[in-house]
């Protein structure tokens, strides 16, 4: 492990795949918030983006290049002739206008059709992206002297061996929803990917799962030893989220995540249609934000048509903006937040954001949702994950203003006392220090 330059803190690099700012990227947001919190604790932390820029606003990336440019590596995987393309073509493909185009392309954030590339990435120095890997490692060697390199997810495990060989540093890897990418693959590819991830996991010194639920699943999928896996819940800085009492709000329900079927938006819309059949909720509005990619457009159109047919389209609002002040304006209005992910989720940082704002969350009893809400309160879970069950959970709460008020204060307290990014960052530092 290299020596610290300042003797007062660690030098840490977070390698983060970006979404290009086209949709609410929970993993991008998670990693960026940890970077900010670790800096506040006196450590030097650098974000290194892969594939696409992290967000549409790249002010904190300074002159750091985007490695493994999405268009470039796709072409090189599909057409080997591009592996010998001149440097100027690579620069063109990785330019900001081209990256913006790639961010909105259908399939750029979906594993279907990208099985071979996923496998190639996991092969690391033996894969088709070997040159990109060496470029990244050489850049880090020239510009940084890291003590720890933190990979955003296990799909990046192919980077670990070459990083350790060339930089002689400890490597940590986060675990969050890798199955969402792997499971849609054809069976043969899916099996190969999990096997590769299990093999490449040996090159990593520690794993950090975002929930106990997902830690248990990842251990089975990748045959990880218990001592190598740690749980650090997601968090936000409560100072960044003003608390607005529910008494000051209209009855508005919010959804904040990528607008697609997998995240349960259809369940949400159908539940709202069901709720609005009851005249007691004539005043209730639904607000949806989180962005989308090209492949989501037809799905979103279908949901809008469904609301139109039900005669309640004026009560459903689709927000174009979801970053920065747009998200803050969204959160300060909502009385409840639901993201009824079809198969549950490893965590969902939107939970921390909503609860920090004093918004009770209403989530299906799937994935880590019972663990997160059960840890410190601030919401309710329902089952099964059907529109009818969700509509009933909403109706019960919207009919009980005292319950909403109690859950609102409980939600805020849960973030101040547990899902506080500074508290969770300290836990992450303990993991870093345990592998020195």
Image: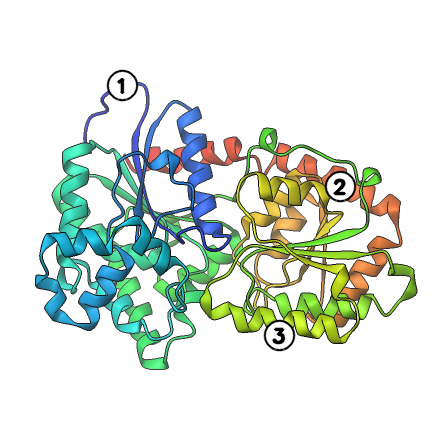
Residue 198 position (above or below residue 134)? below
Residue under label 2: 408
Q: Height in image: 418 above or below 396?
A: above
Name which of mark 2 and mark 3 comes first in the sequence: 3
Residue 164 position, x and y percent, is 18, 45
Q: What residue is rendered at 62% in x and 56% in y? A: 369
Q: What residue is rendered at 8% in x and 62% in y?
A: 84
Query: What residue is shown with label 3?
Result: 302
Circle nearer the viewer, 1 or 2: 2
Question: Where, quadrant-wise, is the C terminus in this rendering?
Answer: top left
Q: Name the spot of residue 13 as percent of width and height, x first.
A: 29, 38
How many C-alpha atoms fall within 10 Å of the one at disc 2: few (<14), some, or many (≥20)? many
Describe the element under mark 3 as helix, strand or loop. Answer: helix
Residue extending furthest toward the right: 279
Depth order, front residue of 217/138: 138
Taking 414 as reference, is 133 left or right? left
Disc 2 versus disc 3: distance between alpha carbons?
33 Å
Which residue shows up at 19% across the image and 46% down it?
Answer: 136
């Amino acid at each position: 492990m290299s020596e610290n330059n300042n003797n007062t803190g660690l030098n840490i690099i977070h390698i983060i795949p970006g979404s290009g700012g086209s949709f609410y990227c929970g993993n991008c947001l998670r990693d960026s918030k940890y970077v900010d919190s670790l800096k506040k604790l006196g450590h030097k932390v650098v974000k290194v983006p892969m594939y696409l820029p992290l967000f549409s606003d790249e002010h904190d990336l300074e002159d750091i290049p985007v490695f493994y440019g999405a268009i470039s590596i796709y072409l090189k995987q599909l057409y080997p002739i591009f592996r010998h393309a001149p440097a100027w073509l690579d620069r063109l493909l990785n330019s900001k206008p081209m990256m913006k185009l790639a961010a909105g392309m259908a399939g750029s954030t979906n594993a279907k059709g990208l099985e071979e590339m996923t496998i190639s990435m996991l092969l690391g120095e033996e894969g088709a992206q070997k040159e990109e890997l060496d470029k990244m490692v050489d850049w880090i060697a020239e510009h940084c002297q890291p003590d720890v390199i933190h990979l955003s997810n296990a799909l990046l495990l192919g980077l670990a061996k070459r990083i350790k060989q060339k930089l002689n540093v400890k490597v940590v890897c986060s675990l969050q929803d890798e199955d969402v990418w792997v499971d849609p693959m054809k069976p043969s590819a899916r099996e190969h990917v999990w096997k590769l991830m299990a093999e490449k996991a040996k090159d990593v010194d520690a794993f950090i799962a975002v929930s106990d639920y997902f830690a248990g699943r990842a251990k089975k999928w990748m045959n990880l030893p218990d001592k190598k896996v740690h749980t650090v819940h997601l968090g936000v800085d409560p100072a960044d989220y003003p608390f607005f009492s529910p008494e000051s709000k209209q009855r508005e329900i919010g959804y904040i995540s990528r607008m697609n079927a997998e995240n349960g938006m259809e369940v949400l819309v159908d539940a709202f249609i069901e709720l609005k059949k009851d005249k007691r909720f004539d005043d209730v509005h639904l607000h949806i934000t989180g962005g989308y990619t090209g492949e989501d457009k037809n799905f979103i159109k279908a949901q809008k048509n469904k609301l139109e047919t039900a005669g309640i389209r004026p009560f459903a609002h689709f927000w174009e903006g979801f970053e920065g002040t747009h998200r803050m304006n969204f959160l300060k209005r909502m009385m409840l937040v639901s993201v009824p992910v079809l198969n549950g989720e490893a965590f969902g940082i939107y939970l921390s954001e909503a609860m920090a704002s004093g918004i009770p969350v209403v989530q299906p009893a799937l994935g880590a949702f019972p663990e997160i809400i059960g840890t410190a309160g601030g919401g309710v879970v329902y089952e099964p994950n059907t529109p009818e069950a969700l509509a009933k959970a909403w109706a019960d709460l919207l009919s009980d203003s005292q319950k909403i008020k109690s859950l609102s204060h409980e939600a805020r307290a849960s973030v101040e006392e547990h899902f506080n990014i500074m508290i969770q960052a300290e836990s992450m530092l303990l993991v870093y220090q345990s592998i020195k």
